[in-house]
Image (spheres, rainbow, N blue to C red):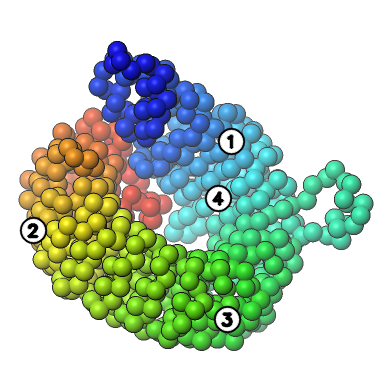
Amino acid sequence: MEEVTKSVLAEEILKRLDLENLCSVACVSTALRSAVVSDVLPSLTALDLSGFSPEEETLNHVLRGCVGLRSLTLNCLRLSVAAVRGVIGPHLLELHLLRCSLLNSTVLSSIGTLCPNLRVLTLEMADLDSPLVFQSNLTQMLNGCPFLESLQLNIRGILVDATAFQSVRFSLPETLKSLRLQPLLESEAILLMNRFKVTGSCLSKAALFSPSPSFTLQSLSLVLDLISDRLIIAITASLPQLVKLDLEDRPEKEPFPDNDLTYTGLQSLGYCQQLTSLSLVRTCYNRKISFKRINDMGIFLLSEACKGLESVRLGGFPRVSDAGFASLLHSCRNLKRFEIRGAFLLSDLAFHDVTGSSCSLQEVRLSTCPLITSEAVKKLGLCTNLELLDLGSCKSISDSCLNIVSALRKLTSLNLAGADVTDSGMVALGKSDVPIMQLSFRGCKRVSDRGISHLLSNEGTISRTLSTLDLGHMPGISDRAIHTITRYCKALTELSLRSCFHVTDSSIELLATRERQTEGGRKQLRKLNVHNCVSLTTGALRWLSKPSFAGLHWLGLGQTRFAGRRETVTATICEQRPWLTLCFDGCELGCYDGWEFHTPQRH
């Protein structure tokens, strides 16, 4: 320490570390703690705490020394309105409050009062207030934050009242460039578009010298009850300068023919000549409702009208076939992201000449497209810039394409959930140099312990780069696979063993032992999901307790024997770990989806 000056230590070493490593360093010596507290924390301008869900005491302790913050991101799963109110203020320019399961809308009025300089606000809330109370608090927030440039308000729950944003159009600041609202009625969205509309007077010569500004919204994202021609036409007429448009609807019943999306709406998107990102998704759980009035002709018109698209995401178009989807690949020459969901007529033929058209593709997601086989993957393998490949629920994908996948030198994310791959196919991935960081084999019934051994013990790159692994719903996975994982995966931070019935207490012991062997750059596990692992017994509790799993932020224990002893398990595992979240409600890793349906354990 005497040989390293304090300034060099802070500037060249400590300021390069993330918050968790800084906390670890501060525990080493008094001198290092002093350097972290006095030199590093005050200089931080941005802090992202979305990776774990702190309670109020931990949050206050972390933020006490961060006096220079301009951007703050919080996972609010266990925070109250009072806790949030205590850490925000006029110094913040960006505020992201995620998974706010305990917050009501009074947090909005607090933000409007305490954060007048905000430029960016993201808020994910459960539906805890009446529409009138919410609207009143929302208006106070918008009036108190006149400089907002980006606003995202996502209200989630079982029976969310879609009238919550009924009066939002009257208070939106004209500085706004990006807007996301969930949920919103189609009729309210049309009225909102009229508020944005550039009138003739705004385009006159007099307006060029007028000091009053007009809306310049460039990004619009809405979750609605219905996407219709009327809505699309209103959007394109009011916001011709749009760069990004993201629309999702969840209709409760089949739309009437004259009030649904047709060719007319798709063709009108051509009025937004700067549009580079388009997402149109119809999501109807347990109901066969889709865009039934759109076939290949509608997509032909879209591809001709919007040739500048770089990102396309379409879901709920069951009548569109290869010809329609191929027209997008051929017309949009700069296409980088291509996502199709639930396209039952999409087959390998759509990608027959993909290299002659969309060589710039970086991300491809083909989810629940049953006619897609390994032949399509072989064609996509010629797109050498591919970084993400998602083939979730494409059940005809087999081992024959894995050699091609293994040659993609930039691929970092691969989803083969539900695919017909086998243990033999894992050899190709295991021997390759593909730098995969996120990998899912969820529901791959023909991959067993032996396949995991082929994947990780063949000295390929994947054993060094893999950070997130999903082995859920795989009957062939047992303690032997976990032994292989603990031996070879040095970078693993997230592991899902959901519904792996042959995983026993031995697996928890192996993972706990791995956590204590941090030499050689081995990372600690942050998230572990053992939901519905019915072979686990309460005897594994001692391996989940301190000092094991010191870096764990989230643990899913639903439908196990632990669930019946929730209070005892919570007290034992979470003692002296206020940052650890236990989930007994069946959420996926981190409660990213489903947090609005449950109240987390308080420690």
Mark 2 or mark 1: name the one nearer the start of the chain: 1
| Residue 10: image location, x then y, percent | 40, 23
> Disc 4 marks which amino acid?
Leu
Which of label 2 and label 4 is nearer to you? Answer: 2
Instruction: Give SS at disc 4.
Output: strand
Residue under numbered circle 1: 93
Quadrant (top left/top right/bottom left/bottom right) for the N terminus: top left
Q: Nearer the viewer, residue 387 or 33?
A: 387
Residue 38 image point, x, y percent: 42, 17
Residue that lies at the very extreme toward the front in this rendered image: 3
Q: At numbered mark 2, what does the secondary structure look like: helix, strand or loop?
A: helix
Quadrant into which the C terminus falls: top left
Element type at marker 3? helix
**Which disc is residue 299 wearing?**
3
Depicted 479 relative to depicted 61: above or below: below
Q: Residue at x 9, y 46 (%)?
A: 509
Q: Position of residue 446 (x, y in %)?
A: 17, 73
> Is 196 drawn above or below residue 364 in the view shown?
above
Q: Quadrant of residue 235?
A: bottom right
Question: Are there few (<14), some (14-19), or many (20+) residues within 10 Å of tag 2?
Answer: some
Quarter of image, res 190: bottom right
- Circle 4 sits on which residue? 153
- Residue underneath mark 2: 480
Give the Cα separation between the discs numbered 3 and 1.
41 Å
Gap between marks 2 and 1, in whole Å?
50 Å
Q: Earlier in the sequence, mark 2 or mark 3?
A: 3
